[in-house]
């Protein structure tokens, strides 16, 4: 799950909205992240460089959702690749939006804590 404050949390199973989140398996900050697109070794991959506490790390993701898996028997491979590419682009766009917002925020005056609420930006499964 990606939040407006830059938190990117990974869970073993997708949390249900409206219920407390379980302990995350992965906890990253994408406030100053870089996203890089890859098509090999698998299509629709992307790598992000993120901040985890005080260390910059790189993580690779594969943009395929349960929706793509469900459609595999009913649609052509061209459609599936376009759908998975669109999912990847949604993730990258959300990450870049938050990173750019953070850079702009750092060059301006700080906002109040109320304006930095943790809204869910994206919940697409990777």
Image (tube, rainbow, N blue to C red):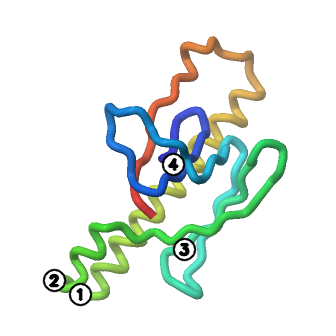
Q: CA distance from mark 4 to mark 1?
A: 28 Å
- Please tell me in which quadrant of the rendered image residue 15 appears: top left
Secondary structure beneath dot 2 equals loop
The numbered dot on residue 94 is 4
Secondary structure beneath dot 1 equals loop
Badge 1 or badge 3: first in the primary sequence? 3
Q: CA distance from mark 3 to mark 4?
A: 15 Å
The front one of 105 and 1 is 1
Q: CA distance from mark 1 to mark 2?
A: 7 Å
The picture places residue 105, in percent across and down from the top left corner, at 69, 27
The residue that disc 3 covers is 45
The numbered dot on residue 122 is none
Of discs 1 and 2, which sits in the foreground? Answer: 2
Does the residue at mark 3 contact the one at mark 2 (Cβ under 8 Å)? no
Does the residue at mark 2 contact the one at mark 4 (Cβ under 8 Å)? no
The residue that disc 1 covers is 76
Does the residue at mark 3 contact the one at mark 4 (Cβ under 8 Å)? no
The picture places residue 68, in percent across and down from the top left corner, at 30, 73
Above or below for 18 versus 76 = above
Q: CA distance from mark 3 to mark 2?
A: 23 Å
- The structure residue drawn at horizontal position 41% and vertical position 59%, both measured from the top left corner, is 125
Does the residue at mark 1 contact the one at mark 3 (Cβ under 8 Å)? no
- The structure residue drawn at horizontal position 47% and vertical position 62%, both measured from the top left corner, is 89
Crowding around mark 2 (Cα neighbors within 10 Å: few <14, some 14 to 19, many 20+) is few
The picture places residue 118, in percent across and down from the top left corner, at 51, 29
- The structure residue drawn at horizontal position 46% and vertical position 69%, both measured from the top left corner, is 63
Badge 4 or badge 1: first in the primary sequence? 1
Q: CA distance from mark 1 to mark 3?
A: 20 Å
The numbered dot on residue 74 is 2
- The structure residue drawn at horizontal position 51% and vertical position 48%, both measured from the top left corner, is 94
């Amino acid at each position: 799950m990606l939040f407006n404050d830059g938190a990117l949390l990974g869970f073993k199973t997708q949390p249900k909205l409206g219920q407390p989140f379980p302990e995350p398996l992965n906890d990253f900050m994408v406030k100053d992240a870089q996203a890089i697109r890859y098509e090999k070794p698998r299509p629709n991959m992307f790598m992000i460089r993120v901040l985890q506490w005080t260390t910059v790390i790189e993580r690779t993701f594969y943009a395929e959702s349960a929706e793509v898996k469900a459609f595999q028997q009913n649609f052509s491979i061209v459609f599936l690749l376009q759908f998975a590419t669109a999912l990847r682009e949604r993730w990258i766009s959300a990450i870049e939006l938050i990173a750019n917002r953070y850079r702009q925020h750092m060059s301006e005056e700080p906002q109040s804590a109320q304006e930095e609420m943790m809204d869910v930006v994206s919940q697409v499964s990777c």
